[in-house]
Amino acid sequence: MMTLTSRVEFTAREGRREEFIQAAKALAAATRDEPGTLRYDWYQDADPDSFVVIEEYVDSDAAFAHNAHCDELLKRAFELGELTAMQLHGDISPELQAFAENMPGTKTFPPLA
């Protein structure tokens, strides 16, 4: 079975950079005990307001479990930053495909057949 990898880009809203960083760190800390989360790493671009999170889950269900577990923290991140792009790589469940179709700037990349 193939894992699901996500690459998500955010831009911190004007004047909210430090708060966004704290929210990103809180999200990373919250994932440490999630059984289906294999990786959750934040990176900063040369532009100090641009950030990327690389997430890896055992499957789509684990990604949805993460979203449910971190619902309040994710809402906070979206208040403080704007999602500018999302890429989902791996086995894309029908539920995840539907989610992606409702998220602006999101592309899915299933494995080669």
Image (spheres, helix red, strand yellow):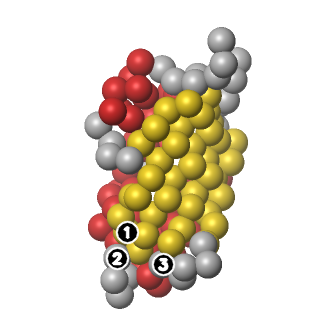
* Image position, residue 76 (x, y; %): 35, 65
* Image position, residue 101 (x, y; %): 33, 33
* Image position, residue 39 (x, y; %): 68, 48
Crowd class of label 3 (few under 14; some 14 to 19; many from 20; radius 10 Å): some
The foreground one among 44 and 42 is: 44
Q: Which mark is residue 40?
A: none
Element class at badge 1: strand
Q: Which residue bears the numbered disc 2?
A: 13
- What is the distance, in whole Å, between disc 3 and disc 2 at their CAs? 8 Å
Residue 33 shows up from this direction: no
Q: In the rendered structure, which disc, 3 or 2, sits on the residue that comes first in sequence?
A: 2
- Taking the spot 41% from the left edge, 26% from the top edge, the residue there is 97
* Image position, residue 6 (x, y; %): 57, 43
Q: Which residue bears the numbered disc 1?
A: 81
Q: In the rendered structure, which disc, 2 or 1, sits on the residue that comes first in sequence?
A: 2
The foreground one among 25 and 52 is: 52
Q: Which mark is residue 49?
A: 3
